Image (tube, coloured by chain):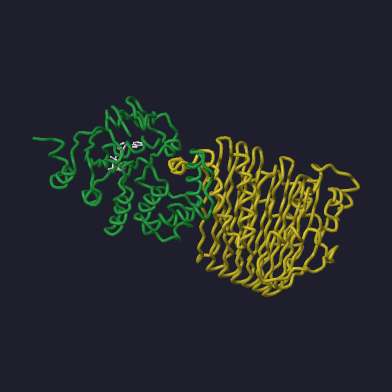
Chain colours: A yellow, B green
Amino acid sequence: MASTLTQDKLSLEAGASHLTNLFRALRDAQVIPSPLRSKSHQWVSDADLLTLFTEQALKEDWKYTPMDFFRYAWDYVPFQTEPLHIASQSAFSSKSPLSLAEVERIEALRSFPEPLSPWEALLSGIPAQLHYRLVDGERLAFTLRNPGSLSAQLITVSLPAHAEAEIGFSIKGEGFSLLRFHLHLGEGAQLRLYYLSEDGSESTYRYLILTSYLEKNASIATYDFTTEVGWKRSEYRVRLAGEGASAHLHGAAYVREHALVDTAIRVEHFAPHTESNQLFKSLVQAKGRSAFQGRIFVDRVAQKTNAYQSHKALLIAPTAVAYSRPQLEIFADDVRCTHGVTTGFLQGDMLMYLRARGIPEPTARQMLYRAFLTEVVEKVPEVSLRSWIDNRLSDVIGAQS
Amino acid sequence: MLSIDNLHVSVEGRPILKGLSLAVKPGEVHAIMGPNGAGKSTLASVLAGREGYEVIEGEVVFEGQNLLEMAPEERSHAGVFLAFQYPVEIPGVSMIQFLRAALNAHRAAKGLEPLDTSDLMALLREKAALLKLDPSFLSRSVNEGFSGGERKRAEIFQMAVLDPKLVIMDETDSGLDIDALRVVSEAVNALRSPGRAFVIITHYYRILQYIRPDFVHILADGRIVRSGGAELALELEEKGYEPLLNPA
Ligand SMILES: Nc1ncnc2c1ncn2[C@@H]1O[C@H](COP(=O)(O)OP(=O)(O)OP(=O)(O)O)[C@@H](O)[C@H]1O
Ligand SMILES: [Mg+2]
């Protein structure tokens, strides 16, 4: 079917509607099975993933990014049973957390075999694919600069039982990047993932799809920081499949003028005693838009679940906009689930307090904007990376507000 | 130092201060007492430059400058310090960051270079010790999670750090336990100097036993209705406002 698409040289739009119809038809004909609910220790099958994505896409009635094309084009590309490239194992192996110096250093060693692949290549089914099987204490770090007109990567990572690992992905400059992580965490495995998106412009488009499957007592923590993009969408689908699994998703975005930063999350609790936590903050410039939707699904078997979600937006100007939509679907009765959404302007009494101590108004505003994002930055476990992120955010806030 | 003349101030169209006059000279300590809602905090806010207060009439001169035309930060640079009745929490800004920015802004206004970190820390530690504050509080966010008493102490600590000429304390004694009241009063007394004046807004006689005022004023319904020496505070303590405001 990929060949049909490329041979016919369908326009992007036609491709989108074609695939949309295809998936709808498959769904209506019940060719695609209902979502995976077993506590199987198997890798999630392609069919399950397709189901997950398709259902999610169709459910997402509230969307701020015209998704159809990207989603279906991407999902259409089948998972390879044999990865195209098996990257060599990381030279870096240590128990201490990933540092920024390493993110920068590893670039040369670990750049993509095909970092820039054209859109056509994606449609024809050969995006850059990397598959890693990490060992305990290992880190993967990538830096992608100026992805150009389009770069697409699929990175699948599996983490064996009780392994602890980190992934850092830093992406800079202009262009369109489509990045998909597919993560599988074995029993008791722990993964931290950083996605640092910076140094862009209005011609920077970034699309992240992160799917992860967690077995018993596995835990994932993600840190998504954005300074300057034109458009960015981050999608997270986290399936807590094993008892005691946990996910902590963090994000802070500085949404520049005319930019759109869109975050869509689906966390699924499919086992008892699972825990999830979402903490996202957006600081939105004039005419910028922040969109957030976070769906928490708690299956009926997932008793004793704890699920939290917090999204806060601070609007710098009256023309800034923030959309927030928490969604809870809870089918178990013994769960603790909270969500909090706030959107607003800087509080006058905080500004007054700083000014009353002699801090000039522009500096006071910058301090408060930065302070707003600090709650998220503080969650970064590694000190040098944390202060680097803090400095980057401060620089951008200082330069633009 | 400070001269307030016939000040009329409205909030949302409602007159709150109705012809208030007060003169404060360097080195003096003035206490302002008065019933709830009389306009004491309004006066403090107007002096500090908070937005939302409309000055209808009157003037305020501080060291020869028209205070009402100055931005809040300029008033601070000129030496005005308000210890807030309700200090606000600022999550994400540490006390150190906050005071570094404030001190350096004060220094910049005087044409001085920023303080280096070791001098800054030495100064902050010294003043924290004066207020018997644990140095660990310096790395906490401004007022966040501080108890009521800690907030008030932190206000006086900031005052000590910024070394102002005119200090307005809005009910700094409210919410302090007996020991904290003594610590705060001792710090204030230690900072009394011929060049520095204090305006202490309070409901209680007790703080005035520690910090002896030169003058006591009663503010009621937007004006100063009576002024006297320290003995006026004692009279109030014994009789309450009623006989003073509505003499038979
Ligand atoms: N921002 C505001 N909006 C509306 N009314 C206000 C505002 N600020 C003050 N007021 C009103 O002005 C009056 C004086 O208030 P103010 O806070 O100055 O009193 P106070 O003397 O400090 O009282 P207290 O002893 O209770 O602290 C009150 O009636 C109060 O409700
Ligand atoms: Mg008051």
In this picture, residue A178 sits left or right of residue B245 = right
Most foreground residue, B79 or A117 = B79
In this picture, residue A226 sits left or right of residue B209 = right
Q: How many marks?
A: 0
In this picture, residue A301 sits left or right of residue B42 = right
Q: Position of residue A177 (x, y in %)?
A: 76, 49
In this picture, residue B243 sits left or right of residue A233 = left
Q: Residue at x 66, y 49 (%)?
A: A226
Q: Position of residue B218 (x, y in %)?
A: 21, 38
Q: Residue at x 41, y 61 (%)?
A: B134
Q: Position of residue B53 (x, y in %)?
A: 37, 32
Q: Is residue B53 visible?
A: yes
Residue at far left of view:
B248
Ligand 2 position by quadrant: top left
Q: Residue at x 54, y 49 (%)?
A: A372
Q: Is residue A345 visible?
A: no
Residue at far right of view:
A7
Above or below, comparing residue A105 to residue A93 in the picture: above
Quarter holding the N terminus of chain B is top left
Residue at far front of view:
B194
